[in-house]
Every structure is written in structure tokens, then in C-alpha cells.
Amino acid sequence: MVATIFLDILFVLYVIAGMGLVLYGFNCYFSIFLFLKNFKRNRQSDHESLDGFLKNLDLNTLPKVTTQLPVFNEGTCVERLIESVCAMEYPKHLHEIQVLDDSTDDCVKVSERKVAEMKAKGYNISLIHRTNRQDFKAGALKEGMELCKDSEFLAIFDADFVPEKNFLMHTVPYMVMNEKIGLVQGRWGHLNRSESGLTLAQSIGIDGHFVIEQSARSWGGLFMNFNGTAGVWRRKAIDDAGGWEGDTLTEDMDLSYRSQLAGWKMKFVFDVLVPAELPADINAFKSQQYRWAKGSIQTAIKDLPRVFTSGQSFIVKIQSFLHTTHYSIHPLMLFTAVSAFPLLAFGHSKLGNMPVWMFTALFATIALAAVAPSTLYFVAQKFSGSVGWKKRMAALPLLMSLGVGIAVSNTCAVLSAVFGRQSPFIRTPKQGGAAGIKKFKQKFPKIALIELSVGVYCVFGLMQYIDARVYLIGPFLALYAVGFLAVGVLSMLHFIGNLNGEG
């Protein structure tokens, strides 16, 4: 009796988790719809307004901009960053550069040398070194703001980004022309897309976010977020939101939502492409994803109550919920993966008792939701404007396996946020253009052992479902098994490869 009740509850939770995955899946189609609806018109409008502004521009009338470069133990790429920012085309007397270096290693010396070199060449650049790291990146940006009170706008770049020379001239004008815009966000590009299957898969995923999702949110009048880098803020928009706060791991998303609740608009510029470096080590990638997953859920807990009680439209509220809680798909996936086997093994599968029409409708719904992310990535690659997109789509199975495989790690991140556990801001190691995978210190990846265990578990579940001829669930369990095993094995291999590294 108790076992039956338990299985009934498990089945209900399984169905709820499946419905959640379907919801997030179908939201991909909504994003694609908004993107395709607005793509041509908005890009044309942006081109025309920018060309008109620059055509009759007097450079001396441009506003002062401070570019902030938050850095932490990133000596491999800080010189490249400083050089690219100094090379940006903007009047020197109106462009201040702050290197916000909180490093605890030799990166500080590298920054000091490069800042001195560029200062000698006439650039208005300074180094600000903190030793306490209070509020991490948010604290560094906040302290930098207090030292440049005469700058109306603030551009921000992380250490692994290499902005083009025209970045400021292709972003700041939109804010000058429209005083309601509090942020202009550029699109991320990729410096090392072809380095490995891992970086290729990541690039496809990131393109999906920027090409489709950010475009759809910006052009569709929805709340969007600053991505922490490759963007320009209006100082007043930051001040009106209450300033930078370090109580979440995604201070960028948090500030974006608070700023939009204060009435400011966010603008995404599709054609401002800023190349960046992708993590070439799976454990570095998982660390980055953990931070993003936990931070976004922290932001949801912190800011969604204000969104729901605000005067925003119903669609904005729903999309804000789906946006900030997007990483919930990982605990949902993990739950469906581990609960499928006991439901069938103990004779609790109800699929066989369904009428044909209901089974067909269920299968069609699940299938459409399952291919929604892949459809989004396909459209993103097609409209990305970069050559070779058709060949890159061959790496889509890698991305799908990667997305599933990190579900264990990201579930830990989501639960950590839900239960209010505190954790430090851990940077994602960068190679700075070095060949191969840069070695760095890392702890033994205990989570990989869980991933491998779940992968083996899913193999047994898959065999059970095949034996029972319940083919609706089989493909998903196969993907789960491949994803967890692949990520677990790769995590161990990269850890072993870094055992002799020094960071």
C-alpha cells in the first residue's frame, strides 16, 4: 500500500516535470517567432538611425565614456584586452579606461606594466587594485564608478573579450539618440570556436541565446538582461536601480531587472559583434554554468516578486519568469531521468492504458517540445551571418549531450540558490590564445562520479524500457545516458590532464 502511494506520487511528479520541460521547450518557438517577426525591420531601423547619427557627427559633442575592465587572476589575456580597448575609436579626451584588477597572483604586475605602457602613449587609463574583493565583480564595478563621476556612460568588458575598434561608435549613439535606453548590449562572438568539439558546441548554444533569445526579448518589448560584458550602461540607469549589488552570482542580470523595473529600456544591437574566448576545459565550463545557473535562480528569487507586483503586462511577467528560471530545466531533466526506471520496473507505467488518440497527442507534444531547442539553434546559425553554419550543425548532437550532461552540476547550483547557500564568485579560467587546453589548478571533480553513476543508471533504465517496448521514453533515456556518461568521462580526462598544471 505504501509502495503504491509512493509510486503514485512519483508518477504525478514525473508528469509535472515533463510538463515543465514541455513549457520551456515551447517557449523556444515563441522566441523564434518574435525573432523572425522583427529581424529585418529592427536591423534596418538600427542601421538607418546609426548612419544618420554618424553622418553629421561632431566628435567633440560625444559624451564622456569610462570603459571598465574587471579582472581577476587573468594574466594570460589582460594585455590583449587592454590593447583592444585602447584601440577603440573614440576621442581620447572623452574616453577613460579603468583596469579593475582584484587579482591575487602575478596578473597585477602584468596589468601594471601594460597600463604604464598605454598611459605613456597618451591614453587615459588607470589601474585600480582591491585586496578585499568585497562583492566580487559587482564591488569592483561599483568602486570604479565612484572614481569617474563625470562619465555619463560606462562600457564593460571581461578579460576574455576583444572588442572591435568601432564598438563605442556603434553603441553609444543609440543611447544619445534615445534617453530612455539604459543599456546597449552587444552580441558575443567566438575567438576559439573551432578549437575542439566542446568549444564548437558551446558556440552554437551561445549563438542561440544571443541571435534568437536576446533579439526576441529586446525587439519584443520583454525584459532582457545585461550579459556582464560587451555592453554600455547609462550611469543614471544604474543609480536609479540602486547600483551594483553583490548578493547574487549574476549581478548583471539582477541589475538589469532592477533597472527595467525602474522604467529603463534595454537595447540589444545584433550587428555589434564582440569576439570572446570559450572555455576549452569541461570543468571550467561546468564552473561557469554553475555560476550562471545559481545566479539566475538567485535573481528570480530576489526580483520576480517585484516583477509580478509591478504594472508590467502579463506577457512580460510570464517571460520574465521563464527567463530567470530557465536553468530549472536541469533539475527537471535529472528528475525525469532517475524516476523513469522505478516507475516502469515496479509496474507503474500507465502509457500502455492510454487511448490511441491520447497517446498520439502526448507523443506529438513531447516530440515538438524536445526538438524546440534544436530548432532554435538551427535558426540562430542560419541568421548568425557567419560562414560554415551548415557544417557546424553537425555538432548539434554534441550540444544536446552537453546540455543534458551538465544537469547534475546545474541541479546542485539551482538547489544551492533555492536553499540560500552562499558561495564565492569563481572566475572561469581563460587561455588568452594559448594553444591547447591551458592547465590550471582544480579540485577533484566529485560531481563527475555522480554523472557517471547517473549515466550507468540511465543505461539500465533504457534497457528496461526497450524490454517493455515503451518506446516513447527510450530516446530520452538514451540521450540522458550518453550525455551523463560523456560529460562525466570528459570531466575526469580534463582533470587528469591538469594534474600537473599550476593555474
Image (cartoon, rainbow, N blue to C red):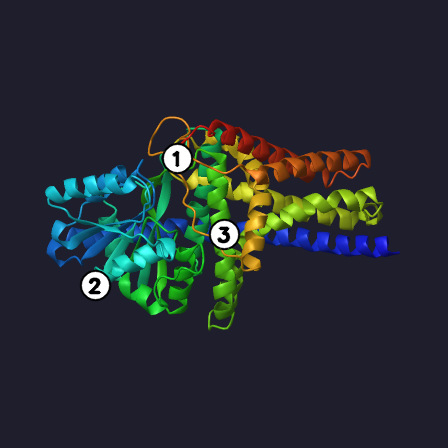
**Circle 2 is placed at which residue position?**
149
Q: Based on the displayed image, in which of its 4 quarters is residue 468 positioned? A: top right
- Identify the mark nearer the N-term, 1 or 3: 3
Q: Position of residue 144 (x, y in %)?
A: 26, 57
Mark 1 and 3 residues: CB-CB less than 8 Å, in contact?
no
Query: Foreground mark, 1 or 3?
Result: 1
Q: Amino acid at mark 1?
A: Gly
Q: Residues within 10 Å of mark 3 (few under 14, many from 20)?
A: many
Q: Which residue is mark 3?
A: 31
Which dot marks residue 503?
1
The residue lying at 47 percent from left, 31 percent from top is 392
Vertical arrangement, residue 362 with respect to residue 150, above or below: above
Q: Nearer the viewer, residue 204 or 271?
A: 204
Question: Residue, x 67% and y 51% (percent of image)?
Answer: 18
Give the class, few, some or many, for how many residues have Cα within 10 Å of label 1's Cα (few <14, many ≥20): few
Tell which circle, 2 or 1, labels the residue nearer the N-terminal end.
Answer: 2
* Res. 483 in view: yes
